[in-house]
Image (tube, rainbow, N blue to C red):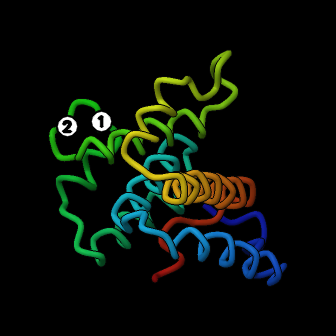
Amino acid sequence: MQSRMTNIVTVLPEVMKAMQALQGAAQKTELPEKTAHLVHLRASQINGCGFCVDLHPRMMKKAGESDRRILSVAAWREAPFYTDAERAALALTEALTRIADREEPVPDTVWNEAARHYDEKTLAALVVEIAAINVWNRFNVATRQVAGEWNP
């Protein structure tokens, strides 16, 4: 596989600054880093972003995440390795990533379950993290960034 072009954030460094600022704001909240990593991986799986599906497990492993939890993200509903709060975050991730797939993109049941586990500021951070990874996925998929070419 070959990239179609240089990574967008290399071509447009201001985009990298904007993305870092966006995610930096979310990271200043109480949203657990492990939760952010889980939603990044799940959205990337849904979006078919090979670059991120390769990158995020390595980042998760570096942050101390277990192999079981990393490998089970795609089947999180059937895996016993996630907290109720993480499950709510993963459900919200799927809804926000697949907004065109249903009449009510984010059902009240999904939103209310997330709101039950996260206060308003942390829930805002969760939505920002989900939105940001979807942007990253779109950059990488559009330009066919090659998995394994960036090592954090």
Q: Are marks 2 and 1 in contact (CB under 8 Å)?
A: yes
Q: Please indicate whether residue 85 sits to the left or right of residue 31 in the image.
A: left
Residue under the image location 24 percent in, 66 percent down: 65
Percent across and percent down for residue 22 are 67, 70
Q: Please indicate whether residue 139 sits to the left or right of residue 114 in the image.
A: right
- In the orientation shown, which residue stands out farthest toward the top? 103
Percent across and percent down for residue 138 are 70, 53
Can you tell which quarter of the image residue 3 is in? bottom right
Would you call the spot at circle 2 few (<14 residues within 10 Å), some (14-19), or many (20 or more)?
few
Question: In this view of the protein, which residue sits in the foreground, 98 or 147?
Answer: 98
Give the residue type at disc 1.
Ala
Can you tell which quarter of the image residue 10 is in? bottom right
Q: Which residue is mark 2?
A: 79
**Disc 2 to disc 1, how far (Cα)?**
6 Å
Would you call the spot at circle 1 few (<14 residues within 10 Å), some (14-19), or many (20 or more)?
few
Mark number displayed over residue 75: 1
- SS at circle 2: loop
Residue under the image location 30 percent in, 76 percent down: 63
